Amino acid sequence: MNDPHPPETIARRPIAVPPHPVWPSLSAPEKGALKQRIKALLRQQNAVLVAHYYTDGDLQELAEESGGCVADSLEMARFGSEQEASTLIVCGVRFMGETAKILNPEKRVLMPDLNATCSLDEGCPADEFIRFCDQHPEHTVVVYANTSAQVKARSDWVVTSGIALSIVRHLAQRGEKILWAPDRHLGHYVQSVTGAEMLFWDGSCVVHEEFKSVALERVRRLHPEAAVLVHPESPREVIAQADVVGSTTALINAVTRMENKEFIVATDGGIFHKMRQMAPHKRLIEAPTIGEGATCQSCAHCPWMGMNSLHNLLQLLERGDNEIEIDPAIRERAVLPIQRMLDFAREQGIGMKDKGNA
Ligand code: SF4
C-alpha cells in the first residue's frame, strides 16, 4: 500500500565521532576512597548528582548512594527541580545539562565534560534548523529532547521518546502537519504508528544506527525464547523485530515486567547496569552491531556518555568549573515547549517517570 504521506527529508550532516575515552583502572580500595571523597565534596557544596542510564555503572551507583538519581534525561531534569541542593551535577551529555538549566535557572548546573555532546544535537545546528523551519511556516515544529537550547527555543513542542507518540497523535488529530527533528529513525517510527503528516530533519544516533537487522535475525534464531527490546532511535528494520519498542525507562521496565528469562537489547550498553540491578536472574544479550557496513563505532556505547567518569567528576568538584550557561532570552523561549510537554503529560495522565527518553 502506498504511504499517504511519503517522508520528505533534508540532507544529512557528517558527524565527527570522538574515540572512546580510556580512564585509568582503579583497585576496589582506590575506587572506594575516590567515591568517599566525591560524596564529601557533594555534601560540602550542597550538590546533588544526577546520572543517565547510559553512563558508567560506578557513576550510577554513586548517584544513588549519595542521594542523587539515575534516570532518563527528562527525569534527571525533573529530579533536579525537586531538590533543595543549589548545584546539580549532571553526568550525561550536554543537552541534558542544558535541559536541567532551562528548568532550574536558579541553580548551578555543572558537567564533568562540557564536550560530551550527542550526534543528534551535533547534526542539528540551530542556524540551519531555524532556516528549515522558516521555510515551512505551516508546520508545527516538534523536536526531540536531544537538541540544543537554541533548537528547543525555535520549537513548538519538545518530546521524549516515551511521549512522542501521544503528542504527535494529538497534533495529527487536530490536523496539524509536523516538522520533526532531529532523529529520522524515531520520526519514521512515530509516523508509522500515528499516520501523521511529517517532514523530517535527517539526523541519527551513531550508537543506535549501528544495530544490524540481519545479524539480529540470526541472534533471535539462536535465542528463540528471548524478547527483543529496541529503542526507537534504531533503524526501522531493527524496530520491526522488536517485542517492545520504547524509551530507556520503558525497556528497563520491560525486563522486570516480562516473564521471559532472556532479552536481546538494542540500545546503549550502559543500560545493562540498571537492568542487571533490577532483574539479576535474567539473561541480557546485546543486540549485534557487527554486520555489513558496520564501522569501528559499532560497540553499542556512546563515546560522549563515556566522557563521564569518577576521575573527571572529582576534578569537577575540586575545580568547580564546567558550568552550563544559557542566554536568558534563549532559556525563556526554550522552557515553553518543554513546559508544554510536561503540561500535556499531566493533563493526559501520562506517567513521565515511566516514559523517559534517550
Ligand atoms: S546514545 Fe545516541 S542519542 Fe544518546 S547521547 Fe549518545 S549519540 Fe546521543
Image (tube, helix red, strand yellow):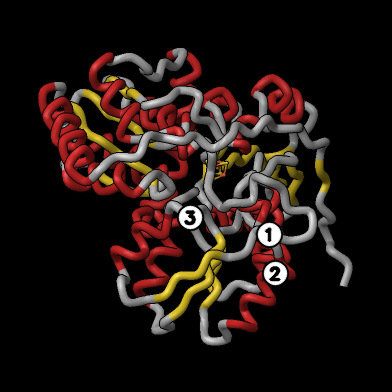
Q: Earlier in the sequence, mark 3 or mark 1?
A: 3
Q: Earlier in the sequence, mark 3 or mark 2?
A: 2
Amino acid type, callout 2: Ala
Place of residue 71 in the rendered image (x, y in percent of width and height, measured from the top left): 35, 49
> Tag on residue 269?
3
Place of residue 321 in the rendered image (x, y in percent of width and height, measured from the top left): 33, 14
* Residue appearing at x 71%, y 55% in the figure: 188
Amino acid type, callout 3: Gly
Kindly identify which residue carries mark 1. 290
Kindly identify which residue carries mark 2. 215
Tags 3 and 2 touching, CB below 8 Å = no
Tags 2 and 1 touching, CB below 8 Å = yes
Q: Residues within 10 Å of mark 3 (few under 14, many from 20)?
A: many
Q: CA distance from mark 2 to mark 1?
A: 7 Å
Name the residue furthest right: 2
Q: Quadrant of residue 11?
A: top right
* Residue appearing at x 62%, y 75% in the figure: 219
| 331 relative to 86 in the view: left or right | right
